[in-house]
Image: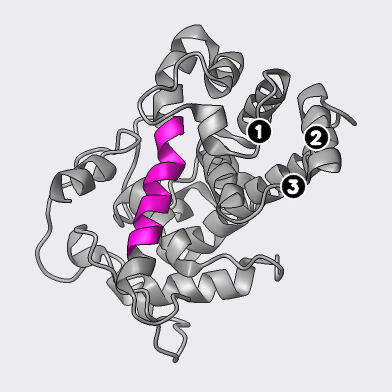
Amino acid sequence: MKSRVVSLCFLGGLLALPACAGPLPFADLMHRNAPSAQTNLTTTWGFGQRENVFNELIVKSVTDVWQDSSTPLPPVLYKSLMAVESSFRPDAVSGSGAAGLTQLMPDTAKRFGLANGDRLDPNKCVPVGILAFQEKYRVVLDPGNYPKIIGLPADKVAFSVRVADYYNSQGAPQGDDRWHLALAAYNGGGGTILRAMSYAIEANVDPRQWDNLAGPPGKALNTPLHKACIDVYGSYGGGRKVNELAAYPRKIMSLYRSAVAATPRPVL
């Protein structure tokens, strides 16, 4: 378990950060607008003292921001995303320029009204991360409106129309399939995932199941996801991106399931 956690901590090329003594950075911010109710988001994943600092902020942000009442976002699932994205380091910065607990890119932050420097402020980036994740979730569940959801001028996109037509005949993703696809879209973009789903449909396999898109763990090459990554990131970049993207939702869901299994009462 320990070696597995280490691999999660370095996902996405996070810059190495020095250990610091004394109060945690941003710890004072956690007491502002914190809900009075106790939560059960305490986990022991191995990320050190920061791991449970942001639990109340996570619960409050999910409660305030998430809008799909038919499929509530489990706060511990969003916490799992943060674990993989930043190892709970508010000042984490990746080699690609993503920053903060939720590893927002500058353009994503700007699109949701967040100043570039505020990506390092937990009270601001955690709610905005939910907005960004919610957008990816909507893209996955409503592919026919993909351009409108992300603000594109085009009325229709061929790969998203193909996925929408599949949903009309076979039904939309359900349960954990929704989370796998939405989490992957948070990492690789909604268009990348819809492209992969379109390629899966062409191959006559169910596009709603992550294993059909990404292949078995460690075998992502020559899959629908690989083809989509090449479309978006180019031949070289796509070959590098596909392995990270294939593993990304699996790592998050593994943490989430471990938290649920370790909790004797229902996880929020």
Residue placed furthest toward the right: 155
Instruction: Residue type at mark 3: give it.
Output: Ala
Q: Earlier in the sequence, mark 1 or mark 2?
A: 2
User: Which residue is tagged 3?
Assistant: 172
> For the point 65% across and 27% down, which residue is it?
205
The CA distance from mark 1 to mark 3 is 10 Å
Q: Which residues are magenta?
A: 245-258
The reply, left or right, for residue 1 in relation to residue 256 is: left
The location of residue 135, given as percent across then percent down, is: 67, 49
The location of residue 211, given as percent across then percent down, is: 51, 34
Mark 3 burial class by Cα count in 10 Å: few <14, some 14-19, many 20+: some
Front residue of this view, candidates 200 and 47 = 200
User: Which residue is tagged 1?
Assistant: 207
Front residue of this view, candidates 224 and 99 = 224
> For the point 66% across and 53% down, which residue is it?
174
- Examine the rendering and report whether any part of residue 119 can be seen: yes
The reply, left or right, for residue 29 in relation to residue 157 is: left
Does residue 229 show up magenta in the picture? no
